[in-house]
Image: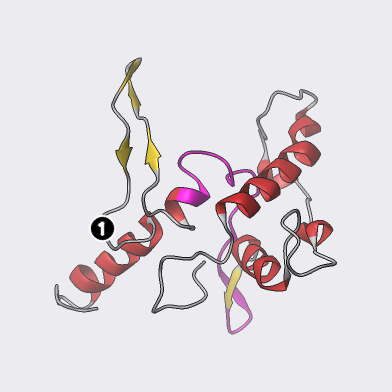
Amino acid sequence: MFPDPKDLSIAAVSEAKQRLLGEAILEQCDAIDGLADGTINNPLLCEFDPVFLTCVEESDPDCLNARELAAVNAVYSDVSVDGRRVAHGLPKGAELTPGGWSRWLSAGIGRTHTASFQGSVAEASTHAAPGVPNAGFGCSTAIMKYLVLHDPDWD
């Protein structure tokens, strides 16, 4: 989700565009189960195509430009190696959830959330370590450092 691997401060899809996408998906797919309740119960039934949000004007804030659309399609697309699927793309519907895109894919720096445990609400806390743009990056980097390479200094 970061177009420049040397600059992890700017995600390919901004928070505003993520919200635009999430709201459009929710509007189209929320009532698939027969109940418009703000929840997509079965994301696999959601056939939303993000091309619907493509910009006419590249700088329009209410649509996705070509780079943003490519990033969104990459998130939803299956991963294949030699023509064989090795991982499913992410389902539609987690763009706005607290544990969704902002935590795992896009611009996790400085995000805060509240955690609930047995009915109590903890104080807001950041969920990304300093210099780590999101949990997906931090988790993947730690796997490479400690499980694959056994080199805590790998960067």
The residue lying toward the viewer, choosing from 100 and 9, is 9
Residue corresponding to mark 1 = 130
Tell me the element at label 1.
loop
At 45% from the left and 57% from the top, the residue drawn is: 107
Residue 36 image-quadrant placement: top right
Left or right: residue 44 compared with residue 96: right
At 67% from the left and 35% from the top, the residue drawn is: 40
The residue lying toward the viewer, choosing from 147 and 23, is 23
The image position of residue 127, as x and y in percent, is 32, 46
Question: Residue pushed farthest bottom?
Answer: 82
At 35% from the left and 29% from the top, the residue drawn is: 115
The image position of residue 97, as x and y in percent, is 53, 39
Q: How is the image coloured?
A: secondary structure
Is the residue 88 above or below the residue 82 in the image? above
Residue 87 falls inside the magenta stretch: yes
- Give the extent of the magenta segment: 81-102
Left or right: residue 99 compared with residue 75: left
Q: How many marks?
A: 1
Label 1 crowding class (10 Å Cα cut-off): few <14, some 14-19, many 20+?
Answer: few
Please name the predominant secondary structure of the magenta segment in the image.
loop
Residue 132 image-quadrant placement: bottom left
Residue 23 falls inside the magenta stretch: no
The image position of residue 109, as x and y in percent, is 37, 54
Amino acid type at mark 1: Pro
The image position of residue 119, as x and y in percent, is 35, 15
At 64% from the left and 62% from the top, the residue drawn is: 72
Image quarter (top left, top right, bottom left or bottom right) of the C terminus: bottom left
Is the residue 81 above or below the residue 43 in the image? below
Question: Residue pushed farthest top?
Answer: 119
Residue 121 image-quadrant placement: top left
